[in-house]
Amino acid sequence: MKQLLMALILLGLYACNQNNNDYQKPENALDAGRSFIEHSLKGQFTTARRYMIQDSDNMYWLEKVSKDYNKLTEQDKTGFKNASIKINEVADVTDSVTIINYSNSYRNVAQKVKVVRQNDSWLVDFKYTFSGNL
């Protein structure tokens, strides 16, 4: 019984460690945007959140997208998980603001995401995708 409990604890620690390994601090705006998009397409919204500015508007939009994603058919989820990201354009608005125009191979619809540098970190300002305000 003791060995089973120890095995379960070790398995739990390993699983937690695996989730933390999904996040890698982005070196630039493109890395941050691409990682956020990739994890979102795969339905890994907890990891995607780590690439995003933590404010109420961004959290609202990520939660909404997450709920919408969970309502998709398994076929659509698989399509998004297997999709590749196509970067259409990268526009450096300033040295700390970049707009990435992208689409994915499953649904070839152009979208934009804003990435900003805050305190030496590149983070997605997800609300821009819905408002378009700089």
Image: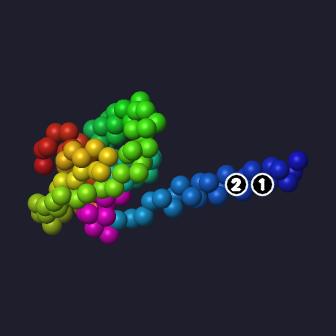
Extreme top residue here? 71
Identify the residue at image location x=64%, y=58%. Answer: 14
Front-most of 48 and 108?
108
**Tag 2 secondary structure:** helix
Which three-letter amino acid code belongs to the residue tagged 1? Ala
**Left or right: 6 as drawn, with respect to 36:** right
Does residue 92 show up magenta in the picture? no
Quadrant in the rendering for residue 23: bottom left
Q: How crowded is mark 2: few (under 14 residues within 10 Å), some or many (20 or more)?
A: few
Which three-letter amino acid code belongs to the residue tagged 2? Leu
- Mark 1–mark 2 Cα distance, whole angstroms, equals 6 Å
Q: Picture coordinates of residue 78 (x, y %)?
A: 44, 44
Q: Can residue 82 be seen in this view?
A: yes
Q: Mark 2 points at which residue?
A: 11
Region of the chain picked out in magenta, as a range: 27-35
Quadrant in the rendering for residue 128: top left
Identify the residue at image location x=34%, y=40%. Answer: 62
Q: Name the residue under label 1.
A: 7
Q: Residues within 10 Å of mark 1 (few under 14, many from 20)?
A: few
**Left or right: 124 as drawn, with respect to 82:** left
Q: Do the residues labelled 1 and 2 touch (CB within 8 Å)?
A: yes
**Left or right: 101 as drawn, with respect to 6:** left
State the scheme by which the image is colored: rainbow
Front-most of 105 and 46?
105
Q: Picture coordinates of residue 113 (x, y %)?
A: 22, 50
